[in-house]
Amino acid sequence: MRHKLDENRLSQDALDIEVKRVEKILEENISEGGVRSIKKLVHSLQVYQEELTLQNIELERHQQESDILREYYYTLFNLLPLPAVYVDERLHVVDSNQAAKNTFRSENISLGITNSLMKSLSRDSIQLLYNSIRSNTYPIYLEVQGNNQDVQIFYDLVLTKLNDCEDEGKFLIVFKDTTIEQKLKEKNAIFLSVLNSSSDSIISLDMKGAVKEYSRNLCQYTVETNNENIIESLPLPIKKEIDNYIEHKVKLNVRHEKTIEVIVKNVRHPLWLRIQLFPVEESGIIVGTGCIISNHTESIKQEKEISNLAYYDHLTNCGNRRLLRLRVSKLISQVDNPSFTMFFVDLDHFKDINDIYGHNVGDEMLVQVASRLKKAIRPFDELFRVGGDEFLILFHQLPTEMSSDRAYRIIEILSTPFIIDEKELVSSASIGISRFPEDGIDFISLYKKADTALYKAKKNGRKRFRFFSETMLLQIKKNFELEENLRKAMAKNEFSTELMPQIRCSDSTCQNVELLLRWNNEVIGLVPPNDFIPVAERSELIHTITEFVIEDAINKIKALNKFSPKKVYISINISKLDILNTHFFEIMKARLDKDKKIAKQLTFELTESVFSDSYTLIVDRLNQLKLLGVSISIDDFGTGYSSLSQLSELPIDELKIDKSFISKLGSDESDKKICLAILSMAKSLGYRCVAEGVESEEQFNWLASIFCDYSQGYFHSKPITFKDFISRYV
Ligand code: C2E
Ligand code: CA
Ligand code: CA
């Protein structure tokens, strides 16, 4: 524009000179007509001159405006707080504003702005700028990087080409330092990755409870994953705790950290969660809530497994004694003191099952017992396994009259044979019962009393139940003392034996005797075998006693054999536990191998109940004993439950009719019939028959008349000493 103005000015000055020169020529030389036309021309020229003047005025105005704009622009350019530079196509800085000078030259002060800009930006960023200029589409927005004193700096820049003709080929670049934002972004990214990599779920909420940030794994607890609803879609227990904390702590400006355990049941499977809530502060002012949710399900599960091991029996899945103790103690401590009844259930002769069939069969039987018992109790009653074959049932609020029914029922279901490994195993159970609060007000005494009642039930013949009573305790105390004395009896030489003759009915001669044990304690005096034998059986003292008796019998046979040519046969009483004892046979074999002939003069008496269970094993063992040479007799025959069909298969030699049938022979016709039946059966099977408890001549005569083989009883003789026996019968 300036150029144009200058040009105009030049042409006007030249025109003025030319007009004057033409006027002079005209005045000197030109005709009037020519002058007129020349004047017309001059007039035109003057008009043109005025136009030019006006044009000049206009141009000057534009020039002024343009200068103002240019100044305005430069002021703006210089005052711009953002670094801005003009560069040429090779990125050489043509001009730069103050901010750019400050930024790019602060550290590279010795370098020119061009070089310092180049140095400040990374090679990649420079390349990016070159490429952008070449692409020729403006404006261009770029993110570039540089560094200042080894500190990474980030810029957002805008690059544009200037269209002003004077600035042709120049580019304006305006920089914005975004280092702080970038660092914040980076920090945020780190924070988010930490947040998301934590196994715990973290939520940051503002003062109103709106979620600001949360870790991705929070979604494991939510139904929907919509960001806005994340809190709303959390399970109720978590949401309630967070709301409650914000309402009662954060909003009230209370600095209080809180940890709560909650169980969440509505997400697939139960979760055990720990929720930590704490205030988030900025410069000492509470600005929101922090929440960390940690999942403890696995550790709780492990704890549960451990407690399962501690409180449950792994074989039957029943609670164990420790759990029973906890339950009972808890029940007792309840304010309303609910009554309960303990059934102590013990399998009869379970040890035999284990010994005979092995532990696998025993275990399977216990599993089946537990399963039967579970079916026999109400859903709210509880079953525990408190020992090998001992179970305890906790009946809640069971009236006494119903206790008996339950006990009968349990005995019945456990008497049904168990099928294990295709074997049919017969068992039975005994039950002891104690009641809260009648029998005791603490676990130990209730447990002990149920055990006492059980002991009594067993002692009374098993397969039965007993309620605890105080007299039981006295009885047990007595038995306990008896056992103590019995243990010392052998060493103190308190045992002796008597002989009871068995008279041959056909000729009233005596060649057979039953050896009966006597215990004379220095304090208690003479204790009847019916009192101490069961005690000995329970304490396993029975084996020592049996060995003593057998040794005594052998010695007596040997002595008699030496003393007289007449053979005397001695019967001894053997406990079922001896037969079941795995070592018994070996002991007998070792003993009788020394005196082979003597075995033939020995008879082992076993009560009929020996066959009530473990039948096959007992028969096996008896066969083995018979091979040693001894005879086998069934004692107290008629009182037990051996089936007649079984009787023919038994490896026995003799039946002893129980004294209860003999004592009523005179008065009871049916007993006569029983005696006759037993006798004829014994004869047909080839067994000897002995009648026991014969107290009168009449009884003896009748027995003789039906051809009973032997008669034993007070009618002939009470048990007598060996010495007396010799003097009377040998
Ligand atoms: P048991 O084998 O039936 O023995 C017979 C019992 O009946 C003996 O009692 C005997 O004295 C008694 N008795 C025999 N005849 C008559 C009679 O006519 N009238 C009456 N009222 N009683 C009669 P004891 O000696 O008291 O023995 C009782 C039980 O003790 C025996 O019954 C037997 O089962 C057991 N016993 C005795 N000695 C031993 C032993 O050495 N070992 C084992 N395991 N048990 C034994
Ligand atoms: Ca006997
Ligand atoms: Ca008997």
Image (tube, helix red, strand yellow):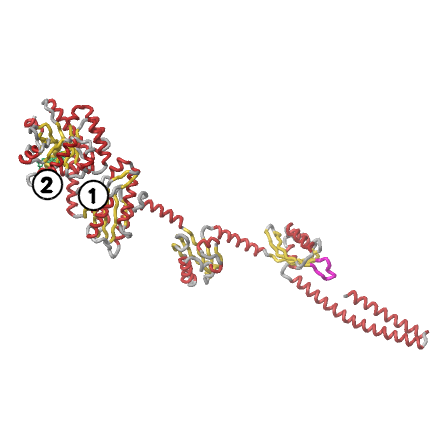
- In the picture, which quadrant includes the N terminus? bottom right
Q: Based on the displayed image, in which of its 4 quarters is residue 584 positioned? A: top left
Question: Along the horizontal axis of the image, is 685 left or right of 419?
Answer: left
Amino acid under disc 2: Ser
Magenta region: which residues?
Answer: 161-170
Label 2: which residue? 670
Residue 325 seen in render? no
Nearer the observer, disc 2 or disc 1? 2
Q: Residues within 10 Å of mark 2 (few under 14, many from 20)?
A: few
Residue at 63% over, 50% down: 122
Q: Residues within 10 Å of mark 1 (few under 14, many from 20)?
A: many
Position above or below: 177 against 603: below
Residue at 81% over, 73% down: 51
Q: From mark 2 to mark 1, how far is it between C-alphas?
A: 28 Å
Position above or below: 416 against 183: above
Question: Along the horizontal axis of the image, is 196 left or right of 477?
Answer: right
Instruction: From the top left corner, tell me how far across and down residue 591 is, in percent.
Output: 19, 26
Label 1: which residue? 463
Q: Earlier in the sequence, mark 2 or mark 1?
A: 1
Instruction: From the top left corner, tell me how far across and down residue 621 is, in percent.
Output: 22, 31
Position above or below: 34 against 547: below
Q: Residue 568 has which mark?
A: none
Secondary structure predominantly adopted by residues drawn in magenta: loop
- In the picture, which quadrant includes the C terminus? top left
In this view, the residue in front, 282 or 513, is 513
In this view, the residue in front, 194 or 677, is 677
Amino acid under disc 1: Lys
In the rendered image, residue 167 lying in the magenta stretch gets the answer yes
Instruction: From the top left corner, tell me how far across and down residue 341 is, in percent.
Output: 23, 51
Tell me the element at label 2: helix
Question: Along the horizontal axis of the image, is 559 left or right of 420?
Answer: left
